[in-house]
Amino acid sequence: MLFSDVVSRAVLRVKMPPKKPKSAGKKKPKGQKAPSPPPIELPDHPEEIFPVVLTSVTQELFACIADEDVTSESPYKLLKKADIIEDMKTRAAVSDFSPAKQKVLDYPEDEILLVFDRDFVYGTCFYLVVTLEAKELLITPPQPEEEPVEIEREVSKTPELKEWISLGSEVEIENESVRETREKLGFMLRVQRKARAPVCFSDRNASDDKHGNLGCPSYEDSRFSIKWIQRDCGIQAAPTVQSSSAQTQWKCRKNMCSQYKPREFSEEEKDNILQSERMKEFCNSVVLRMLVALQQEEIMNVFHDDWKALGTSPEDGDCSGKDCAELMLYQSFTDQKYSKDRKISCINWHPTIYGVIAVAFTEKKEQRPKELTSPDVRPSHIVFFCFSNPYEPQLLLECPDDIYSFQFCPSDSNIIVGGCRNGQVVLWDISGHVTHLQRAQSSGKKVSANTDTFELDDNKESKTPVVRLCAVSAVESSHKAPITDVQWLPPTFEVTRMGIPVENKYKTSVQVVTCSPDCSIMFWDVRLPKLLNQPASVRKQSPDQKAEMTPFSVPDTFKHLDRTWKPLCRVLLPNIKTSGEYAPLKFNFQNYTCNENTDRIPEEADEDDESSEIPRDFSQLRLPSDKNLTTLEDVNTKLYIGTEDGEIVYIDWKLEKDESGRLHSTKPLNCFSVHSWLVNTLPRSPFFKDVILTTGGWKFAIWQEGVMDGPIIVSPSSERACTVGCWSLTRPAVFFIGKDDGSIEVWNLLEKASEPIQVHAHVTTAKITSITPWIASPKQHFLAVTDELGVIHVFEIPKKLCTPSKNESLNLKIYFELEKTRLEDYLRREALWETEQKEAKELTNQMPPKPLQKADDTHLKEYKEYLVLEESIMKADTQEA
């Protein structure tokens, strides 16, 4: 059987919904638990393939990036079976290939075929071919057999007439034809006698009229009419319309609303309708038409974009696509309970669940003094929303204080770290509520987090699940000011107590970096300290020893850190010129990508070394000894810092020892004062690792790491302050800037470098606090925008701003090189001008001054000559008079 036949049979299979039993409408007896909701049905696919969802990280690891390494023209990629198994061992359940684990293990050959499915035929953009027959058919399709060419010359023959066989088409044509059923009405019209009377024309003098001309407008001649022999017209009767009014005036006008619910059939009536003969006849009558429609859909591509094929799409420069090239509002989230009188400080999309977004709310500055005197203080939470229900939160994270910044762990999306206003670092584990978020997003209804423990009763009010924190840092060891930024270190490396980067044997993100205006940056480690008095076999905890989780219990993932967590390393920020220190608000460091294979052979691993086996959770991770770690020399330990005063500081986080052996922070390498105040954002370009965007005050700037003379691009000063900025995830030259008046600017460096290409005014009526892009699918991109009113606006980014132009990355790289050259030339000219001014000043100082008496004699002589000339002129005027 060919692979195409298998796919056709899978597509043409029509599934009828199962019939509900008659007893479905009856009430359930007391004491019985409600049945669990049916599992989510996945799209049908042949047995020869297995659809998989590959994230951007997995695509980069296996060199199968969509639309770059694999395209619609060459969608095939051979992956090594050993690499896939190693990925499943390394990342365990986080690996994108874990659903297809058994298929991969059972595959007989060493290379598995990965196919890029751009049209999402089976629900995902990739699928694995798990049989050898299907793999051979896809790689080497069978060639069509050539028909033998007849050498003999065919003689054209006149086709013979055949008897026409009626199949019933003449009946349909006869029924569809229109016939007149009533006789036409005849009218007799009289013709006026003067219609053909003679007409007399005469000349007219042009001088009789004031303007010398006379207009001849058209008019209807009453002496002439056309004789209608016969007229064919249609007449239709219509009811008489009558308008009436009453002497009543509604003076009191006010807005009113009413809540209603649709009227539905009862369960018994629904069962009777589904089992009736009339419903069966209807289903039998439409089956044939449904099959024909499915066949037409298989033969013809219903998703073909005719508008784009005609060359009138926005990418082709047609003005008709201007409206489609702007941001379109897709969804809005708000909640009166948690967002009232609060502003949004941070927002993050869930890395793995579609349409789930997490938001952190903080109190406004003008309301904090009132709350300090009031006894009742509202608790702080991180709120999870989803597309299916935008008006009700789906999950709450309990916080000891307002959260200014939080981030999902790149290795495990269930682990979240956050920075509080009081300077403490908090950890959460939401692994017990992932099913709740997935069900809420897929069904659009709130369900209990544990259906085995609680009954689903519609009469009872469903409450939002609250996740308690797993661990919080010790107050005496935390920051002394609010934590304004927090980030996870990538799983490719970790740092020691001296800030030296070393290899990460666990291949899991285990360290966190935080910054605060208390003039310090701290590194935190989430692992247990290594216990030397216990063997490795005792330290490992079996899964059976873990306590069973309940909805209100706290996971013991980070129980060893609660209230005792201390920073691993602390970096101070001394001023480069004076004796003060910098107060950081945001920071950014370059991600390190490990290209070498640092995995060791299990036989050569130490028995006490726990990195020989990858632990399944964070509670089993322990700090390794610094002696067994390999130092990574190619890691960039320098980072950019944005301060409260609008300064951009470039510093190395590695600590040094002084003469007494004490560790101290190094002086910054450079410092620039470009922004007026408060550097709000410091994002790094997803396409260029050395390019950074900064916003603050009335300007934004673009920096290139390695250029120590200043920013390569500085925007002109705008009327409104820039509050936030972010890069596009798909176009290297496009980025978004948010303003304090609620507007968003879209910039394209290759199209216009001095002004934005689009300005979306009045996106919101308040100051924009954050902008976060997200790629839901290759055809759907979102941009989340938040404001000080506590409202989240999700916009759908148009295709024009998502699809990169030809060689856009290369052209932008050339543009950056030109700007770098321009900056160097400008600095060279400025230095030359300062040198010339200094030399001219020194030359002026070396020249001897003129004697004062000689200068006075010269002025006196000139004045006397002027008096003589004036006297002569006056005498000449007197003589003439």
Image: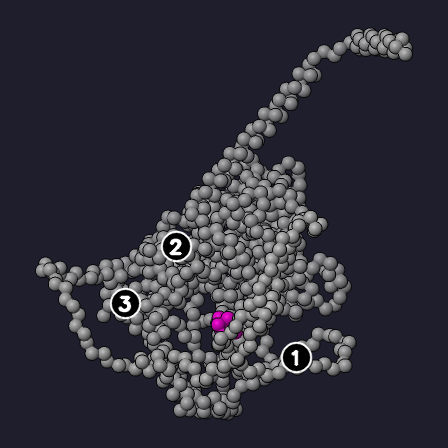
Q: Which residue is mark 1?
A: 258
Alpha carbon distance from label 3 to label 1: 55 Å
- Residue 631 visible in rendering: no
Q: Are marks 3 and 2 in contact (CB under 8 Å)?
A: no
Q: Amino acid at mark 2?
A: Asp
What residue lies at 57% left-to-right and 69% top-to-bottom?
Answer: 195
Quadrant of the rendering where the C terminus is positioned: top right
Depicted 216 relative to depicted 38: above or below: above
Q: Which residue is mark 3?
A: 4
Report how many numbered discs are placed on residues in the image.
Answer: 3
Q: Position of residue 291 (x, y in %)?
A: 34, 76
Badge nearest the viewer, 3 or 2: 3
Q: Which region of the structure is painted magenta?
A: 438-444
Q: Position of residue 407 (x, y in %)?
A: 54, 58
Question: Which element is circle 3 on?
Answer: helix
Q: Main secondary structure of the magenta part?
A: helix
Q: Position of residue 729 (x, y in %)?
A: 49, 53
Depicted 166 relative to depicted 744: above or below: below
Is 51 in front, or is 282?
282
Q: Which residue is mark 2?
A: 67
